[in-house]
Amino acid sequence: MQRTAGLVAAAAVLMVLGTAPAGAADGWQKVGSDARSGVSGIAYEGRTPHGAGVRALIVHDNKDTGQRRLSRITDKKGSDSVTPVTWDGPEPVDLEAIEAVPQKPSEYLALASRGIVYHLEVSGSKAKVLDYTPLPAIGGGDNFESIALVARNGHLAALWADRGAGQDRPATLYAAPFTFDDYGQPQFGSVTHRTYRAAYPAGDAARHISDISVTDSGRIIVSSATDEGDDGPFDSAVSDAGRVTVSAAGRAGVTLAASPKVLQTFPRHKIEGVECLPGSADALLGTDDENLGGYLRTAPLCGA
């Protein structure tokens, strides 16, 4: 039942974006027209009533007061729409990732590039900030574009990463047990970390980890990207980076692949959002192609 629902949702994603001409030939559908409307992170929100479509939340990396931070992509009877979600609370600067909180419907974590985590409750067209806190163990020069939560054995673990920069700075992948306190503030346990170099793309403009998702079986799926400037050129790949486990005692364990397996490359796009759809082999991918806008597509990258 769960897998069937996931496959229905994944198929519906393909219909969500209608028949937008830009990028349609290679599977990408345009969802934003400029640098303020690209996809910097994505979280599957759920199916629409009667399972006819899907909803996803996307964050935007805007920095100025009053600019949009959060949107919802919704399929309604085969037609797509991108609508704003009002941010209610302290306004973040440069949101780069968003993740649903397991077993807590309507609750999400959003992450800003400097390492501030926002605990959100999303209801209708409003996202209320319940609390916020800095990530633990922030290293010098860290720039964050990813966060994922894993539920196993009755415990939660969090994964997040400094994106890295070119050959001289690999990404650093962090992991820790995760809970909330009585006020809803995110709480992190003992932190471990590993370095990670993307197999593709390469070069001085490479960001080794631009987003993270975890499959039902515990595989760590990461996107990597190059950004040569606001007009590109861009390049991306999605890779199998390793595995995460959560012990019966709640300890988070990460094993990274010695040679990450590149699952698929995506020329001309800068992927900053990757989300494995529940119960499905499909990933929902989002791009922030700066002045060229934002794009969305699915690809079968999250199988066992």
Image (cartoon, rainbow, N blue to C red):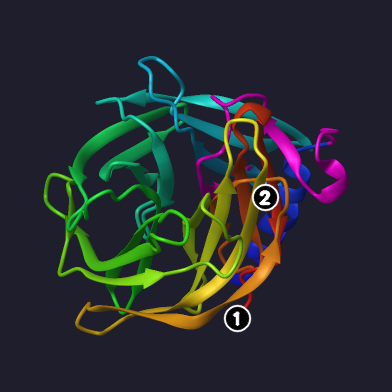
Where in the figure is residue 83, as x and y percent of width and height?
A: 58, 25
Out of 128 and 241, give the one closest to the viewer: 241
Q: Is residue 256 left or right of residue 72?
A: left
Q: Residue at x 49, y 62 (%)?
A: 213
Query: Which mark is drawn over residue 51?
Result: 2
Q: Which residue in the protein does label 1 denote?
A: 304
The magenta span reads: 19-48
Instruction: Give the SS element for disc 1.
Output: loop
Tag 1: amino acid: Ala
Residue 72: give x, y in percent of width and height: 55, 34
Front position in the image: 268 or 154 = 268
The answer to whether residue 1 shows anywhere in this view is: no
Look at the image and tell me whether residue 238 can be seen.
Answer: yes
Up the image or down, 79 lies above or below 88; here it is: below
Left or right side of 300 for 93: left
CA separation, marks 1 and 2?
Answer: 25 Å
Q: Position of residue 98 (x, y in %)?
A: 42, 46
Where is the N terminus found, in terms of image quarters?
Answer: bottom right
Q: Residue at x 38, y 60 (%)?
A: 169
